[in-house]
Structure formats: C-alpha cells, structure tokens
Amino acid sequence: MSKKKTYNRVARLYDLFDLPFEYGRYRPIRRHMFNGLAGRILDAGVGTGRNIPFYPEGSDVTGIDLSHAMLARAELRRDRLRKRVELLEMNVLETSFADGHFDATVATFLFCVLEPEHQLPALKELARITRPGGEVRVLEYAYSKKPAKRLIMRLWAPWVRWVYGAAFDRDTERYVADAGLEVVEFRFLFQDIIKLLILKHPESADSTVVWPSNP
Ligand SMILES: C[S@@+](CC[C@H](N)C(=O)[O-])C[C@H]1O[C@@H](n2cnc3c(N)ncnc32)[C@H](O)[C@@H]1O
C-alpha cells in the first residue's frame, strides 16, 4: 500500500494510537526540535500537526504532507491553537519550493516512514530548499542496542509497518554526505531509540560534531 493510502487510512485514529507515546516520550522532544530556529521553517511530513504548539513565536512555518486526511487533522489543530501555519499537500521528494527557500527544515518521524530508496532523494530535496547555513533537523527511531529492548522493538515492528508503513532501521545518517550535507550534531533524545540529526551544508557547518554518548 502507498504511504498516502496508509496515512489516509490511519489519520482518523492516528492521535489516539500515538497518545501514550506522545505524552510519554515525544512532547519534550518536539520542543527541542524547534529550539533556536527562526524565520521560514518547513515541517516536512507535518502529519496531524503535533509539532504546531512548539513552532517558535514569530516564525513563518509551512507544513507539508502527502496525506490529505492527515493534513485535515493538522488544519483542525492549527485553527484550535490559533496559529498561522501554511499547510500544503506535497511530496517531500519533489517539493515546489525554490532553492534555499527555508531558514530551517525539520522532519519528525518522517524518515522512519520513507522507504530506503527514498531516504537519499528526500534528504537531497531538504538540502536543496534549505539555505546555506540553515539547519536540516531529522528525528527518527533506531533499534536499541540493548537486547531486551531490541527484542520488544522487533516484536512491535510488524504492527508499526502495517499501521504506519514505518520501520526502526532507517539509518538516515548513511545518506547525509551524498545529499551534500554534513552532520553537526547526532544524539539520542530518548533512551537509545529516538535520535536527532542536525545537518548543514558543509561550507557552513560547524566543525565540532557532537556524536552520541551512551544514553
Ligand atoms: C509517522 S508520521 C509523523 C507525523 C509528524 N511529523 C509527527 O511528528 O507526529 C509521518 C507523516 O509523514 C507523511 N509522509 C509520508 N511520506 C511522505 C512524503 N513522501 N512526503 C510528505 N509527507 C510524507 C505521512 O503522511 C505522515 O503524516
């Protein structure tokens, strides 16, 4: 099933299914994803708009998503929160934005959903539309290195695949150099299973890369 169909199907129940994780894990992380960002920001794979409460005051945010049903939920949340956010139905693999249009691009749990062959094209597209010096921030799942936790994740994986078309093994950092970007920060924000990548164009990247320490 295509991702569009998958998310049009799950949209109605998405927030309900995610509720324990949203309040148990994601909320503090979402705040972190937008810390220090300003200007024009893209929320790629905006989903039901769970990031909306954390968009920086005064910023100009555009959210894109492949699924109209997920966007409809995001619109309701945006209106309820009285935020000014542009929401567009668009594929991250081929957006209509000009080169360097955004000061920063953010993708939370989008790369776990993209198939391996789409990881590089998606990262390249985010690199293209983010201005030199601007940050590309990616948040995604990884398999735990701890055997018990890893086993639980392996048992969960078929459900996650079926409901969300997602996987825990995406390893997006493999594609960073080929996308013309450089890692400026890589660390785990929840145990050793939810990781943050902050990427920049090499000419503008800070040379002090922070690699993950033991969570
Ligand atoms: C797991 S959800 C994450 C939603 C949101 N970012 C969050 O943190 O709650 C992934 C979202 O990415 C969207 N998506 C999947 N493939 C996409 C693509 N190629 N372009 C744009 N959005 C896509 C899905 O429709 C879905 O809304």
Image: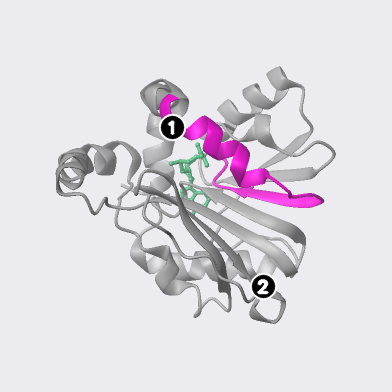
Q: CA distance from mark 2 to mark 1?
A: 29 Å
Asked if disc 1 is less than 8 Å from ligand 1, the answer is no
Disc sitting over residue 177 in the figure: none
Measured as percent of width and height from the top left, residue 57 is found at 81, 36
Left or right relative to 100: residue 190: left
Depicted 6 relative to depicted 139: above or below: above
Query: Residue drawn 69% across and 26% down?
Result: 78
Query: Residue drawn 56% across and 70% down?
Result: 209
Residue pointed to by mark 1? 25
Question: 67 and 38: which one is in front?
Answer: 38
Res 190 quadrant in image: top left
- What type is the residue that disc 2 sits on? Asp
Q: Secondary structure at mark 1?
A: helix
Magenta segment, which residues? 24-46
Depicted 105 relative to depicted 47: above or below: below
Q: Check if residue 143 falls in the magenta segment.
A: no
Asked if disc 2 is less than 8 Å from ligand 1, the answer is no
Residue 69 in view (yes/no): no
Question: 29 and 77: which one is in front?
Answer: 29
